[in-house]
Amino acid sequence: MRSLEQFKINLKGLTEDETPLEYELDDDFFQLLESDMVQGGSLHVSGSIRKASGFFKLHLHSVGAVRIPCDRCLDLMDQPVEADLSLMVKLGSEYTEDDDLVTVAETDPVLSTAWFIYESVVLAVPIQHVHQLGGCNDAMMRMLSEHSAARSSDADAKKTDPRWDALKGLLIDD
């Protein structure tokens, strides 16, 4: 298993030129971050960091797929994702994060991009993630169908209270 050392950038070692960055994210990356939502994946991350007067501009673009549980059947599925990350980084007295501005302590001028990349990828995952039609686990779908049918028939069987029916007659139609 690899480490997250490759995602660390020594800011004091950068020149005024644009420094290209390339990363390949795989299952090991998500295991190292102990991710609950994302179980694995395969992504290519490319971008650059540029030193300007008093700050640094970091731009990264991630494209690939992550392995996440299906909301419907709970089996793992591959979800295509594409994410962009832009950060302004400056050196200061202590480490802080404010929106898109990260301040790195001058005493330890190393920026770790691993967590920022992970967050941008997770934010690119759609809220609802389900297999394509017919891709879900058949046994789970049968069980879901059985339980859903039982609930809906119970709701249909309930009759309204006659006292409420009498009150409905008092409503004024416009």
Image: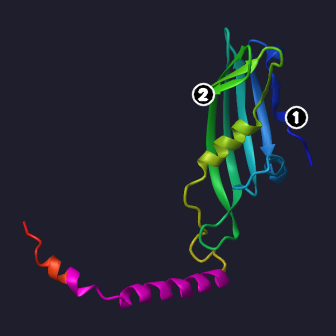
Real-space Cα separation, disc 1 to disc 2, in angstroms: 23 Å
Location of residue 120 with respect to 168 vertically, above or below = above
Magenta-drawn segment: 138-164
Label placed on residue 100:
2
Q: Nearer the viewer, residue 143 or 27?
A: 143
Q: Nearer the viewer, residue 96 or 114?
A: 96
Residue that label 1 marks: 5
Q: Residue 51, position in %: x, y?
A: 71, 15
Tell me which residue sits at (59%, 66%) in the image.
130
Magenta highlight: main SS:
helix
145 in magenta: yes
Within-10-Å neighbours for mark 2: few <14, some 14–19, many 20+: few
Tell me which residue sits at (78%, 35%) in the image.
22
Tell me which residue sits at (76%, 27%) in the image.
20
How is the rendered protein coloured? rainbow
Indicate the quadrant containing the C terminus: top left, top right, bottom left or bottom right: bottom left
Q: Residue 42, position in %: x, y?
A: 76, 52
Task: Tell me which numbered mark, 1 or 2, is placed earlier along the sequence.
Answer: 1
Within-10-Å neighbours for mark 1: few <14, some 14–19, many 20+: few
